[in-house]
Amino acid sequence: MKVFTTGQVAKICKVAPRTVSKWFDSGRLKGYRIPGSQDRRIPREYLIRFLKEHGMPLGDLEDEAMAKVLIVAQDQVLIENLKRELPLERSFRTNTAASGFEAGIQAESFHPDCIVVDFSIGQVEALQICQNLRRSSDFAETILIALLPDDGSTASFDRSSINETFKKPFDAALLAERLRTLVGAKKELV
């Protein structure tokens, strides 16, 4: 378990160490004192919770405290439904891409924990996105979810590079809950 000193918390919050001590002493910022000492320690999850409750930026903690989801789709209704179910206040950051090229650029810069690929952009392009991501060691642990169109055809392709599939139409809340489970297993989401 990662813990911080009051000095480290002060740097993260861009305040004086005395301010952090006051937050701690008043009970607003949870933590513990080291036995036999006046030194305080603040566990990572308490610090993240405190920052979120007070609308403070997470700074360097954001990468470990937020689940990042890249949505590769052209359907604006689908994108808005997913964004609504994956709000920032529930520890989710979302980005979107409309093509394979854009998905590659977004994946490199955004470093998502999960990529949701809507196969309505075209099965060949969607499969290529999934296969290209799996070829890169940087994305070996990235969760890939395929959204398959309900067009009556049985999509026959190699699904080994995909973690989960959802058939459209689907319940966005159900997909969001599955993302919380899958990403939550990788990260300690607070």
Image (cartoon, rainbow, N blue to C red):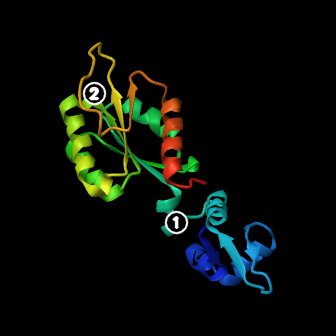
Q: Position of residue 76 (x, y in %)?
A: 36, 32
Q: Residues within 10 Å of mark 1 (few under 14, many from 20)?
A: some
Residue drawn at 40 percent across, 30 percent down? 78
> What distance separates the C-alpha of mark 2 from that of mark 1?
35 Å
Give the residue type that dot 2 points to.
Ser
The secondary element bearing badge 1 is classed as: helix
Give the residue type that dot 1 points to.
Leu
Q: Position of residue 66 (x, y in %)?
A: 50, 55
- How many marks on residues? 2
Q: Position of residue 29 (x, y in %)?
A: 72, 68
Quadrant in the picture for the N terminus? bottom right
In the picture, the disc for residue 155 is none
In the picture, the disc for residue 120 is 2
Q: Residues within 10 Å of mark 2 (few under 14, many from 20)?
A: some
Quadrant in the picture for the C terminus? bottom right
Vertical position of residue 27 compared to residue 10: above or below: above
In-image side of 146 versus 180 (left or right): left
In-image side of 16 versus 136 (left or right): right
Q: Nearer the viewer, residue 173 or 145?
A: 145
Residue drawn at 32 percent across, 22 percent down? 149
Provide the residue designation for mark 1: 61
Q: Nearer the viewer, residue 71 or 163?
A: 163
